[in-house]
Image: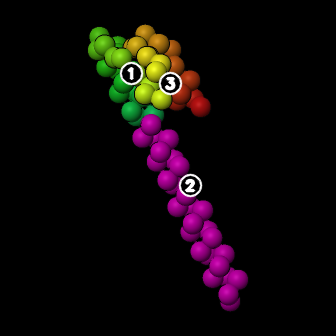
Amino acid sequence: MLLALELGRLRDRVLSDLNAAYDYYADTRTAWTIVEGAIAAGQKVVVRNVTTGTLTTEAALVDKIRGYIAE
């Protein structure tokens, strides 16, 4: 009986983690799609990575979006 209870808890945790991972993927994909649409509409974008100092413009970002979604 104890093993069955523990297996049920494990199943619930795994399903919850899988749902959270898929939600993250779906939300991220939606966000990139919104950014891609804004850039296609002419919106200018400049993102500075404060850690590395790298500047990314909309031109570079467009090239990265599809890879980010696929990965």
Of circles 3 and 2, the one toward us is 3
- Structural crowding at the residue carrying mark 1, measured as other residues with C-alpha within 10 Å and reported as few (<14), some (14–19) or many (≥20): few
Q: Is residue 33 above or below residue 4?
A: above
x then y, percent, for residue 47: 38, 21
Of circles 3 and 1, the one toward us is 3
Task: Describe residue 34's horizontal placement relative to residue 17 as left or right.
Answer: left
- Give whichever of 60, 29 is nearer the camera: 60
Q: Is residue 20 above or below residue 35?
A: below
Residue 17 among magenta residues: yes
User: What residue sits right under mark 2 in the picture?
Assistant: 18
Distance from label 3 to label 1 (Cα)?
12 Å
First in sequence: mark 3 vs mark 1: 1
- Give whichever of 15, 39 is nearer the camera: 39
Of circles 2 and 1, the one toward us is 1
- Structural crowding at the residue carrying mark 2, measured as other residues with C-alpha within 10 Å and reported as few (<14), some (14–19) or many (≥20): few
Picture quadrant of residue 70 = top right
- Secondary structure mostly taken by the magenta-highlighted segment of the chain: helix
- Give whichever of 22, 47 is nearer the camera: 47
x then y, percent, for residue 30: 40, 34
**Range of magenta residues:** 1-28
x then y, percent, for residue 34: 35, 27
**Quadrant occupied by the N terminus:** bottom right
User: What residue sits right under mark 3 in the picture?
Assistant: 52
- Residue 62 appears in the picture as rendered: no
Q: Is mark 1 on a helix, strand or loop?
A: strand
Instruction: Kindly identify the amino acid type of the residue bearing the numbered disc 2.
Output: Leu
User: What residue sits right under mark 1 in the picture?
Assistant: 47
- Structural crowding at the residue carrying mark 3, measured as other residues with C-alpha within 10 Å and reported as few (<14), some (14–19) or many (≥20): few
Q: Residue at x 43, y 10 (%)?
A: 59
